[in-house]
Amino acid sequence: MRTWKNILQQACPSVAFRANEPLAHHTTVGIGGPAELFCSISTKQDLTAVLQIAIQEKIPITILGWGANTLIADRGITGLVIKNTTNNLKILDQNLTPKDPEQLTARWQAATADTNMPQFQDLDYDEKSAEQVLVEIDSGAALPVLIQKLVRQGITGLQWFTKIPATLGGAVVNNIHGGTHYISEFVESVEVLDASGNKQTLRASQLEFDYDYSRFHHTDEYLLTLRLRLYRGDQERAQAIITKWSRQKQKQPPRSLGCVFQNITAKQQRELALPTPSIGYLVDQELGLAGTKVGDAEISKLHAAFIVNTGRATASEYLAVMRQIHQAVYIKYNVSLKPEIFFKGFTQEELAFLTPL
Ligand SMILES: Cc1cc2nc3c(=O)[nH]c(=O)nc-3n(C[C@H](O)[C@H](O)[C@H](O)COP(=O)(O)OP(=O)(O)OC[C@H]3O[C@@H](n4cnc5c(N)ncnc54)[C@H](O)[C@@H]3O)c2cc1C
């Protein structure tokens, strides 16, 4: 029979395809209905082949990294869900001359706005004069493992992203921030498979990086490998940051999806005369919502920008808590919060409350 599973299995015999895989097993928050068809892929060759066949056969594709920023509906996801665990690492060039530092979007304000986290001034330092190293890494590489692997070889730069649950691909899609740094600072170029199944190389300047944003929010492109420009830097200092940072990040509840809404803008903060744009501050100190619960989905009492799964929370419960925060902020401040997470498998109606009014 010509089913999606048979087509894919025949074309890519080295990959195991399973029907009805519960996706709660593949997200940090432990929420998510079944994938119609699921596979876990560990090599770039297999990832490319599976994506190309699925595109050719018009099978809907969802690519998941660590599932640390994705809320999956209780009804699950139609089509193929690929869990990306590709993790090859190549050092391409060790003696790059430093490039001119690019104009970076200031993260400082957003970073220091997080009143639940200690400040960063005592940790930050400038590595730009260090010799640079070009590395090519598969998009499924687990970021915490990658950071350690690189620092052990004296390659630094990514220490700022310690303890962030992510694959490198997921991290670049969302342009993660750690301390005062964005991951986009280190991206030289990426190799993607486009919506027609063709490989393309895109330079960093083409990726539309911004706060929690890149072009991958609006394109049907799949990241295969990424070239990062890192440093032959101070290994001891980087390791010290990893240790200190890990301790600080322990405050963040892991059975969550990170911050669910973006901080308000500096302009909104000024207009509302608030002491900080931090969404955690707003939810906790201004609205007193920390600890609010629907079923097993709860606004964290440790860090009110996070919603945690305290037991067997469903996606509907999680979304209901998001709706409460969104409504409370809108009623008190006339501000429509922007979500900082991705949604898969929901209907437009279910997410309509997030559309700016
Ligand atoms: C405890 C905790 C702490 C966190 N701390 C931080 C923090 O300090 N800073 C921060 O910025 N974020 C933080 N986050 C959020 C999260 O870690 C990041 O957003 C991270 O980028 C998610 O990566 P992922 O691989 O899990 O992506 P996923 O959730 O798996 O995917 C995110 C999106 O990217 C797409 N995607 C994934 N891989 C690819 C690919 N190869 N090609 C194309 N599209 C792809 C997915 O389809 C989805 O739309 C935290 C989350 C948690 C749970």
Image (tube, grey):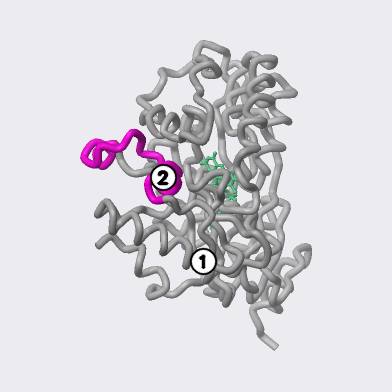
* Residue 195 on the magenta span: no
User: Circle 1 sits on which residue?
Assistant: 344
Please indicate whether residue 188 sits to the left or right of residue 25 in the image. left
Is residue 102 placed above or below 325 in the rendered structure? above
Which residue lies at the image location 62% right of the left edge and 15% below the top edge? 233
Alpha-carbon span between mark 2 and mark 1: 23 Å
Please indicate whether residue 302 sits to the left or right of residue 220 in the image. right
Q: Quadrant of the C terminus?
A: bottom left
Q: Position of residue 20 (x, y in %)?
A: 69, 76
Which residue lies at the image location 61% right of the left edge and 35% below the top edge? 249
Which residue type does callout 2 highlight?
Ile
Towards the viewer: 39 or 332: 332
Q: Is mark 1 within 8 Å of ligand 1?
A: yes
Neighbor class of circle 2 (other Cα within 10 Å; few <14, some 14-19, many 20+) is many
Q: Main secondary structure of the magenta part?
A: helix
Give the residues drawn in magenta, as a range.
Answer: 266-287
Seen as rendered, the residue at the extreme top is: 129
Which residue lies at the image location 71% right of the left edge and 41% below the top edge? 88
Dot label at residue 88: none
Dot label at residue 279: 2
